[in-house]
Image (cartoon, helix red, strand yellow):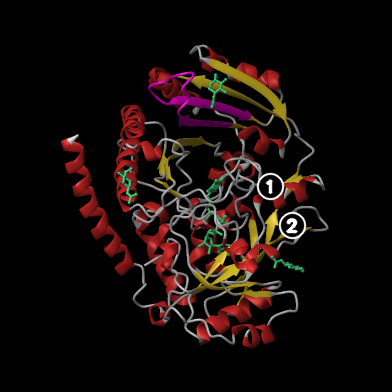
Amino acid sequence: MIQLKLQVLQTRDWFLSLTSLLLLSSGFLTTPSLFVSASGIPPRIQHDLGHFLSPTALIVLPGSPRYAELAVRWQDGGRPNYGVIVVPATSKDVSESIKYANAHGIPFLAQSGGHGSWYGMSKLQDGMGIWMHNLSKVEVSHDGKSATLGGGLYVDDVIRELWAVGKQTTTGTCNCVGAVSPGLGGGHGFLQGQVGLATDQIISAQVVLADGRLVTVSDRSNQDLHWGLRGAGHNFGIVTEMQYKVYDATAKPEWSYEFFTFRGDQLEALYSLTNRMMRYQPAEVIHWSRWFKNMTVDPENAIIQYSITFNGPIDALNAYNRPIHALNPVDSFSGTTDYPGLAVVNGYTVDGYLCANGKGALSLYPIIVDDYDMPGTRKMYDLYNKMLHTVDAFAAGSFVLLEGYSWQAMQAVAAESTAYPHRDQRLLLSPLINFADVKNRTLATLATYWGEAMRTAGFGSNKRRSYVNYAKGSESLQSMYGYEPWRLQKLRQLKKKYDPTEQFGFFAPIK
Ligand SMILES: Cc1cc2nc3c(=O)[nH]c(=O)nc-3n(C[C@H](O)[C@H](O)[C@H](O)COP(=O)(O)OP(=O)(O)OC[C@H]3O[C@@H](n4cnc5c(N)ncnc54)[C@H](O)[C@@H]3O)c2cc1C
Ligand SMILES: *[C@@H]1O[C@H](CO)[C@@H](O)[C@H](O)[C@H]1NC(C)=O
Ligand SMILES: *[C@@H]1O[C@H](CO)[C@@H](O)[C@H](O)[C@H]1NC(C)=O
Ligand SMILES: *[C@@H]1O[C@H](CO)[C@@H](O)[C@H](O)[C@H]1NC(C)=O
């Protein structure tokens, strides 16, 4: 006990200095936001900005009944504070809003799905929230090979509307998450092994830059930004619309799945088997697992819920899964569905538990690795159990997510052709710590302590790489944007060119 307290104290000091370091290095001190007081939003904004916006756009101030509804986010930790929320109806509305914000020294931030977990978003104080969800066009092109997608869509909109016309494409897997922002940092999903990451689908985009200019970004226009948008996109502008690759959904419509329950003592057997299966894992197969408490199965330690998702018939899945059955799981069940049904099977529908807003404070400690480091994975599991036993407040909502998507189409895209830097790595492991009382600093410090300890364990002997869309704020730039020196060099040049005053400084900013 005493030893733990000591560790926590040290961690707290470390955390506090880290926080001030992050503040200093974030550009906070050089952006106009510092000069905006608590009453920084001009009282005449509705009249003055409203004059330039389209008739269906809205300008919502705190105190208005719409405000609370629009300001809702998935979690309460790291929330930005909006002195005003603008709901644009067109790209031009976004452009006018940014010009107005710049003229009045108001910091601004786009919000689409409201799931971003970068804690630096809370540095936006008394700012302008640009609420994107009304930019919701889904329009398939005549040749059926692409679609125009609005900048504020949710994953659910894209899956549903494309499915209705026999199409599908890579999006995130959770239906309430924004459809655009995941792709700006990579974008992992069930189809990535077959057609590539979300970011690989972006043919062109309409982007409003830091100065309010609306530009087209593609391989012919602002080509350098097309590179940067695909992996570091949050840094350069607000995407109001994009032309996105879509695919025939009728050729291979059948999906099958199987869920297994294992106890923790099977961890080594299970994940070394996974490493072996990854040598022949087809593009149609996804290995996922989650660690959480199920008192019925194991009152002491977390269970391992392991799942295989397969774009194909169930008898082929059964054959593939034979070695997993040979490990004697506690329990298993299987079934078939279609592509939109995957969200139902995984509990990722908009009305499901995972999508419910108001999750208290929540932080992920993402790990990207080539394969499972066995001693590291064991250590991460043991730490997770120790944490659940030590901090009651973390027990209800914390879990560990281990995502093993297929990679074939992701790796078919040349690594240097986009800003997404982790194409060689296939696993995405994420301890996730959740607690209700957002204001409790002790819990925040404890979460950082346990989260970073689990993360360090999970990396094992691997280089520290993190998925920018899961990142919390303590990650190095190299770990999110790549270790090759030319990558950061190129990103810094782009930042200087397209966002010289660091207006886009609230989400994984390039420095
Ligand atoms: C439950 C859950 C499930 C997830 N599942 C997946 C998954 O399957 N695959 C995956 O890759 N990631 C996934 N993520 C991570 C996800 O990519 C990030 O959380 C992402 O930031 C969420 O985008 P959002 O629009 O919902 O969030 P927001 O908080 O609205 O936006 C996040 C950031 O993007 C910026 N932004 C929003 N809209 C735009 C725009 N139109 N143009 C430019 N910038 C914009 C915001 O200003 C902010 O900085 C998941 C996250 C959660 C919480
Ligand atoms: C979205 O736009 C429509 C009109 O196109 C408008 O009626 C509606 O109020 C807008 N939604 C929000 C949340 O402002
Ligand atoms: C725990 O596991 C048992 C057996 O697999 C299952 O029936 C039950 O639904 C699980 N409980 C929870 C809360 O997941
Ligand atoms: C914060 O959480 C800790 C650990 O659960 C608890 O001991 C403490 O009383 C809480 N503090 C406040 C102010 O609620």
Asked if the residue at label 2 sits under 8 Å from ligand 1, the reply is no
Quadrant of the displayed image that contains ligand 2: bottom right
Q: Measuring from the top left, give residue 69's x and y in whole percent.
A: 62, 61
Q: Quadrant of residue 23?
A: bottom left
Q: Marks 1 and 2: in contact by CB < 8 Å?
A: yes
Amino acid, disc 2 = Ala
| Rendering quarter of residue 208 | bottom right
The residue identified by callout 2 is 147
Q: Is residue 214 above or below residue 268?
A: below
Q: Residue 286: horizontal and vertical position, in percent?
A: 57, 32
Q: Position of residue 157 (x, y in %)?
A: 71, 52
Residue 169, label in figure: 1
**Magenta region, residue range:** 286-309
Image side of residue 2 versus residue 102, left or right: left
Give SS at disc 1. Answer: loop
Which residue type does callout 1 highlight?
A: Thr
